Amino acid sequence: MYKNEESILLHKSQRFAVRITKMAEYLSEKNKLFLPLYSQVLRSGTSIMANVSESQYAQSPADFITKLHIALKEAGETRSWLHLLWEKGVLLDKEYNSINDDCSELIAILVASLNTIKKNINID
């Protein structure tokens, strides 16, 4: 229903998922102690892309909004896991700032997209 191959959100969520998978793979080889945390950030970080992709084929405006809300919740969770990894010293400042900035950008785009669709269909 909403399929848009040129979607900035779709493109950025795909690129972010690739970054998250590479980060989890790298960290898994570097430090095995936090493997459960890497799995968590991998799940939530790639779920953003999955839900944005699903939204492209939403059955209705409500379904579209639901998928983007789920993606937003997953992005918030991902940001929390990234912060924990940084606090524990697993991610260096430069690494954390870079990937956290990407996550924050996705959150901003998701919020703006949700606000726009809700405004366009008159939902609060």
Image (cartoon, rainbow, N blue to C red):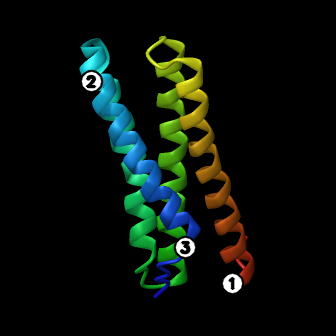
Residue 121: image tag: 1
**Residue at 29 percent of width and 17 percent of height:** 30
Task: Look at 43% across and 15% down and name the residue there.
Answer: 90
What numbered label is drawn on residue 7? 3
* Of residues 84 and 61, the one drawn nearer to the viewer in this rendering: 84
Counting residues from the start of the chain, the first of labels 3 and 2 encountered is 3
Q: Position of residue 8 (x, y in %)?
A: 57, 67
Question: How far is the residue under mark 3 from the one under mark 2?
Answer: 32 Å
The residue labelled by disc 2 is 28
Near mark 2 (Cα within 10 A), the count class, few <14, some 14-19 or many ≥20, is some
| Residue at the (24%, 21%) spot, across then down | 29
Q: Quadrant of the C terminus?
A: bottom right
Looking at the image, residue 12 lies above or below residue 90: below
Picture coordinates of residue 44, whole percent (x, y): 40, 44
Q: Label 3 to label 1, Cα distance in Å?
A: 20 Å
Q: Position of residue 32 (x, y in %)?
A: 25, 15
41 sits to left or right of 76:
left
Local secondary structure at mark 2? helix
In the rendered image, the vertical position of residue 22 relative to residue 67, given as above or below = above
In the image, what residue type sits under mark 3? Ser
Residue name at image x 33 percent, y 23 percent:
27
Say whether residue 11 is left or right of residue 112.
left
